[in-house]
Structures are given as C-alpha cells and as structure tokens.
Amino acid sequence: QAALPVGLRPPPPRLTLLSLCSQEWLSRFGYLPPADPTTGQLQTQEELTKAIAAMQRFGGLEATGILDEATLALMKTPRCSLPDLPAAAPARRRRQAPAPTTWSRRSLSWRVRTFPRDSPLGRDTVRALMHYALKVWSDITPLNFHEVAGSAADIQIDFSTADHNDAYPFDGPGGTVAHAFFPGDHHAAGDAHFDDDEPWAFRSSDAHEMDLFAVAVHEFGHAIGLSHVAATSSIMQPYYQGPVGDPLHYRLPYEDRVRVWQLYGVRESVSPTAQPDALEPEEPPLLPEPPDNRSNSP
C-alpha cells in the first residue's frame, strides 16, 4: 500500500496527546478558558500559541508560542496549584489582576490540623517551620500570627492527598505540591493544603525532596492575599525553586515586601528602604539539626 504524502499524513498520536495535555495544563493555570462544555470544542491554534507565549513570559522563558522542550520542562516543574492568571476574565482583561482580598483583622490564629503521615519531619518540626514561614510575613507587616489548639483557627493547615474536597486535587509526587486560599468570607479562607505524597524535607541537600519551609512561605503569601507574580526572584512565582535558606535568617525579596506593604502597610519597626531586623519571639520554636547530624544526636 502506497504511503500518503507527508502533507496528508495524520499527526503522530503522541503529538495529539501532547497537545491535549498542554491545553489542559494551560486551562488549569489560567492561560486558556476551559473547552466549551456544550460542543467540546478545544482552542484554535492561534489561541493555543498566544496562551503558550503568555505562559512562557510568566515563567521567564522566551515568548515564542512554541511548545518546545524548555516549555514542556517548565510545565513539568513542581508548582503551586493556584492559577497564574484569572482565566474567567475575557482575554483582553487577563493582564489586569483582580483586586486582592485582605484580612480585616491584624491578629490571626493558625494550627496544623493534619500532619504528614510518612515523613522524616516530626510534628514539632512541622509546627516550627509553619511558625517561621508565617513570621517571614509578620516581621514586616502589622500582621501577627499565633498558634492555637482549637478548631476555630483562622488559618487551618492540612497535609492531604488526591481529591480532598476542594477545587484543587493533588496529583501524587511532583506536579502540584500545595495551595492556599485567599482571605475572604468563605469557610476555607486562609487555609493552606500541602500534598502529603510529596517528599517533604528541611535542610536537605537531596534535589528530589521538597523544602517545606520554602513552599510554606509561598502558600502563606496567598493566605494573606498575594497572587502569583512573574518575577523570577519572587517567592510568589508559581514554580518550586528549591530551598530558600535557613528559616531563622530568610528575608523576602524586595518586590514581595513592596507588594505586601501595599496590602497591609509597613510594620512600625521596619524601614521600607532597609533590610528589616526580625524581632524574635521570647521563646522561638526549636528547629532540629541538619539530617546528616541527627545520627550523632544523643
């Protein structure tokens, strides 16, 4: 049987599947509206090209609109579940982010409701990392966070897997690793969820592990009203970039400080033009030694 001319051959199945997967990814994170539920029609090639270019710009890549290897690699990078752009808005308005929501109160309570099941991190370490991740934001704003034991905490923290009764089901190791909800009057306002299928770690040199402190700082940025930003130096970029440093000494990049100051103002003890000196609590929670030293501990 004679082969069809090249121009008439159907595309390889892999490319068709790749196109469908990329459209689903672009839709999930706000770069494309979902497929028409009535007709099932997917996006045109022009719409797909524009969406890929927007995703590339947001991710710090050259905006070619071509689904190349670098773009596919970025799509596979572990990241936050929240979208980067408000997908429901008309295309001409997507560049304008919706008005952020903020907490009307300045004293907020938090608690870890569920802990990781199979993790080298003990419960006290998880609680300490959450304390310091929240402290990153309270050091420079009028916000104050305090841990409580009851069920009425403003910020509820959970480690969950797969579908856990919200709009952002987890997908196993890699993929989406965590999300948090913006302030508001809904029941989940401020809550943060971490994928319990991730290899959560702290002070680890293993590139395959996920630094809990770095991800928590990002998610608590959402919990107080910050959205994703394209700046590659920002803690609020959507992609996981690895550990950010020791929780006792980490300071937010200047752009993140400016954005949160626009929401809440500057803490009285902080100069907007200077690197703030963190005010330590009277009894800060203790963090363990690096994993390599644990075997030598008494």
Image (cartoon, rainbow, N blue to C red):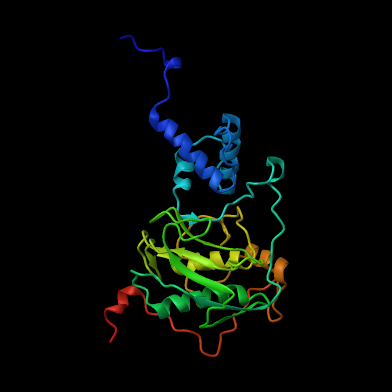
Horizontal and vertical percent for residue 175?
44, 53
Point 33% across, 9% down: residue: 2
Horizontal and vertical percent for residue 231?
60, 55
* Viewer-closest of 13 and 186: 186
Residue pushed farthest top?
2
> How many marks can you see?
0
Quadrant position of residue 207: bottom left
Task: Give above or below for 135 relative to 259.
Answer: below
Whether residue 125 sits left or right of residue 137 in the image: it is: left
Q: Residue 249: tell me if it is visible.
A: no
Point 30% across, 78% down: residue: 294
Task: Give above or below for 10 relative to 30.
Answer: above
Task: Give above or below for 204 relative to 207.
Answer: below
* Viewer-closest of 165 and 154: 165
Task: Give above or below for 9 relative to 272.
Answer: above
Quadrant position of residue 172: bottom left
Q: Residue 197: tell me if it is visible.
A: yes
* Viewer-closest of 222 and 207: 222
Quadrant of image for the C terminus: bottom left
Point 60% across, 34% down: residue: 47
* Viewer-closest of 157 and 204: 157
Horizontal and vertical percent for residue 245?
48, 69
Whether residue 50 sits left or right of residue 202 in the image: it is: right
